[in-house]
Image (cartoon, coloured by chain):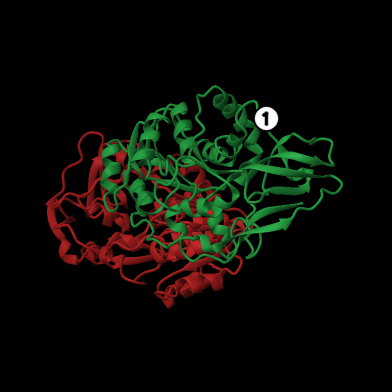
Chain colours: A green, B red
Amino acid sequence: MTGREITLASRPSGTPGEENFALVEVDVAEPAAGEVRVRNTFMSVDPYMRGRMNDVKSYVAPFAVGAVLDGGAVGVVEASNEPMLPPGTTVLHGLGFRDYAVGPAKLFRPIDATVAPASAYLGVLGMPGLTAWVGLRVIAECKAGDTVFVSSAAGAVGSVAIQLAKRTGARTIGTTRSAKSAGVLRDVLGADTVIVPEEGRFASQLRAAAPDGIDVYFDNVGGEQLEAAIGVANDFARFALCGMIANYNTPIPGPRNIVQAVGKRLKLQGFIVTDHHARLGEFLAEAGPAVGSGELKALETFVDGLEQAPAALCSLFAPGAHVGKLIVRL
Amino acid sequence: MTGREITLASRPSGTPGEENFALVEVDVAEPAAGEVRVRNTFMSVDPYMRGRMNDVKSYVAPFAVGAVLDGGAVGVVEASNEPMLPPGTTVLHGLGFRDYAVGPAKLFRPIDATVAPASAYLGVLGMPGLTAWVGLRVIAECKAGDTVFVSSAAGAVGSVAIQLAKRTGARTIGTTRSAKSAGVLRDVLGADTVIVPEEGRFASQLRAAAPDGIDVYFDNVGGEQLEAAIGVANDFARFALCGMIANYNTPIPGPRNIVQAVGKRLKLQGFIVTDHHARLGEFLAEAGPAVGSGELKALETFVDGLEQAPAALCSLFAPGAHVGKLIVRL
């Protein structure tokens, strides 16, 4: 049998375009002993994939030109040579951006699609959700009474961070890039204050939103928002540096007020979710039931069809193109 | 009786000049009940005093124009209305930049001038020493086997940080601004590698000095050295942000590579020594005997005469003007 997959046709410079990707038809191997074949149903579209398109050493290996863009995915086992994963099992894995994934059973983790819809395991209950939880709880040590600023707060990670901060008893401020996602952030996620940043004016916007300063900054953006956060930070504020999407495609100036980190005793700490994988169980024990009860919202935008995956990937870097977790549905 | 004191004549903009200070003659009050009069013998000249010359809220109150520049000092009690501090007692206090200090006994802390020379309590055994100890041990969690980079390593704080890092079993890299202080750093303090930064070339200089990266950066400088340190940092490196003298007088660009803090999981943390005053005893228990035995060197530059204090203060911001702790001797 054959299936389709998305490969990296060439390395983008700056913002990726659809010409950097190709849709190719390939033979799908029969599963060998201990292996399974999975038909993918949902695929995760993630900002960190941009970094893997460059030929530089980072915390994840770069994609090879001509090779498939293996990203996160959910699928259903169709053929199995492993009794622990019988056909019909819903699994989470890292062999996305293709119709069919074939590999040893240990690469596929069964998920409970009765607790929450399977797609949630790519977002609020998956890597983005755990990222938000680790950044907020472990790195930024968020506590009740804090004022918490989350950038890109209608995004996959930010939408969970905002909700977890509220659950912790914090006052929340979130930024997002469109009026539409601002509405979602306020009305669906319950952010206390929502800002749509205006270039060159963000520092004063944030100051107006946080007259008593901020205690935690969950940074998904970097650039002007990071600088503004340093400017309004209270003494001993904690910054969880999760990603800096503003820096992914083009270089931007560093925070000119970094010297304030001394006088204010700020802690700025970068983190990567994979270092904290041991805490997945603890996270799911809290977040799973909360998603099931609807208390924690899964904010998702779906794009239909594998052939739409390159456009979806490119849209990640366009303002306000989607809210929450961006998912390709097959 | 009368005495002289140094006052702030006007607020400097940019690098301070001697015209910003005045030497005035004042009446010295008689000590009241519970008070002492101290004849100052050594006065501390500190970079943080530059911040106090601006009329902005910081972690220490600004100096008032026309008021004395109260800084750290050591002196000898000459007249006393407090039995705990009899005449002849050597004391450490915060009423410097004047010939005589008069005030309640609780403002003066007796020091043991038999363990180390009295001037050491302004440097290696004083605030700069405790600063180095807190930054290295508490904030940066320096351990044996680390590669530690200290900027301004022949300065009051840096010279102690370099020595403490060596004592911890770390490999040390230090920067300093003159060939003369580079020699001191290498030969007296025992730094493994010494760099005299060349503008625009520092990143490659540091990379050559640290082919295996750095694990700890003790930042006294900010600017280009901070950016270079981020560039060569190993995963999970810890940055103790102690001061950024490059930023004190004129604004400079922030680190353009701050995004690397995410992938490398860096921790950048600002600190102020006064938050850690409770650990002074622990620090002195380690450092006192080490200074006494000569194992920990007190690097000091003396300037003679109160009237030289303004010039000394201005020279803090000139390249390579002194090594170690800058002290005015009366």
* B216 or A213: nearer the viewer: A213
Q: Would you say residue B132 is visible in this rendering?
A: no
The quadrant holding residue A65 is bottom right
Is B277 located above or below residue B132 in the figure?
above
Q: Which residue extends farthest right?
A: A33
Label 1 amino acid? Asp
Q: Position of residue B159 (x, y in %)?
A: 46, 62
Determine the secondary structure under disc 1. Answer: loop
Give the side of residue A24 with respect to residue A49, left or right: right
Image mark 1: chain: A
The residue shown at (38%, 44%) is B274
Q: Position of residue B184 (x, y in %)?
A: 47, 72
Q: Which residue extends farthest front?
A: A1
Q: Position of residue B156 (x, y in %)?
A: 41, 60
Is A160 located above or below residue B26 in the figure?
above
Give the side of residue A319 with respect to residue B162, left or right: left
Name the residue beneath numbered marker 1.
A112
* A250 or A43: nearer the viewer: A43
